Image: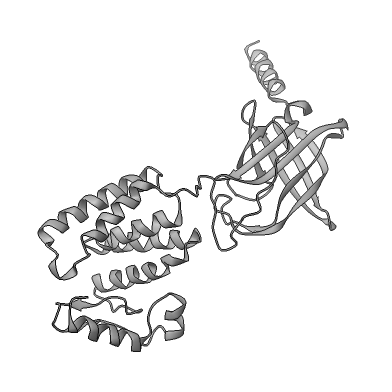
Amino acid sequence: MVGYAILLTIALADAAAARSAQEFVGHWLYKLGDRNFILLELTAGDNAAAPLRGSIARPSHFQTSDGVAISRIELPVVRYPLVRSAIDGDLLRVTFANPTDASDEDEFELRLSGSDRASLGLAGLPFTPWPLERVPGSVAIATDWIVERTYRPDDSDVSNPEMARIFDADQADRRDFGKIDWAVVGPADAARRTATKTLLDGGKLHTGEDFQKAAFVFQHGNGPDDYLLAHTLALVAVAKGHVEALWIASATLDRYLQSIGKPQVYGTQFSGQPGGKFTQDPYDRALVSDALRSQLGVPSLAEQDKQRRQFEAGPP
């Protein structure tokens, strides 16, 4: 009798988990920051064999390695018609076909997580499912994508003003390089790194500009860990389409290499005293060509020699 009660409870739970086609009907939107990326539109079908009809609209091409970071987003926006649907408990399996090649199909799994919330995953792929929100009606997919930029759901095009304030203070302390009082600037640098780390850990940095400025703050750290973190922040800035961060990405790697006793490879680091001799050593000048340096916004070897002589002539 006890075993029967357990079986009955399981059967009732399974029945409760089953979803009706009507529960999936609607306009389901996935956004990357403020940009509409994917719109899944579903209407009721004609019978149990085809419980839903609809389409999915998205940019024609994009890349992802984990389902979260999306890059190489390319237009035009294409609408892919739904060709098959099937409800399996609380899961809806939907297959869409390429409108120009019917043999090219993608199967997705839509799972409801609330009255107006759901997740959409590519069947058979270990990607993080995309969170969807049911919206009142059809919306347009964004068309202002930057191909070289990587987008994430928490993106914002608005830079953090506190990060800008921290960066401005960092630069102001270095405006007159020959007269820096390191007894004052050193502790101020440490406080700026702490404040930047708080913003970073709290998810308050969003734009490429934010991450570039954070990279400068940590480049002014006092050890390999600070420099390696600065390099990582610069790479994120570049990934977000902020190509101006290529130089700081190079400089932070050079500084990290020298801090662990290895030669720099780009030539961004100079050491010396104003009016005295300056050096870039240790420096492996052969590993990276001038052609590659130019791609990173780093001066050629000849220009670096000119820089060094200018530093030796007076305060850099």
Residue situated in front as seen by the camera: 276 or 149: 276
Residue situated in front as seen by the camera: 223 or 30: 30
Outermost top residue: 1
Q: Position of residue 127 (x, y in %)?
A: 60, 49
Q: Is residue 79 above or below residue 269?
A: above
Compared across the picture, whether 139 is left or right of 226 comes to right
**Which quadrant would residue 182 be assigned to in this image?**
bottom left
How many marks are shown on the rendered structure?
Answer: 0
Compared across the picture, whether 12 is left or right of 260 comes to right
Compared across the picture, whether 247 is left or right of 11 comes to left
Residue at image x 68%, y 47%?
A: 141
Q: Position of residue 36 (x, y in %)?
A: 63, 45
Q: Position of residue 205 (x, y in %)?
A: 41, 49
**Which quadrant would residue 218 be assigned to in this image?**
bottom left
Residue at image x 24%, y 77%?
A: 270
Residue 183 visible in image: yes
Q: Quadrant of the C terminus?
A: bottom left
Compared across the picture, whether 279 is left or right of 78 comes to left
Q: Position of residue 103 (x, y in %)?
A: 84, 57
**Which quadrant would residue 110 be assigned to in this image?**
top right
Residue 129 visible in image: no
Q: Is residue 203 above or below residue 271?
A: above
Residue situated in front as seen by the camera: 196 or 222: 196
Residue at image x 13%, y 82%?
A: 276
Q: How is the image coloured?
A: one colour
Q: Quadrant of the N terminus?
A: top right
Q: Is residue 145 above or below residue 138?
A: below
Residue at image x 16%, y 58%?
A: 185
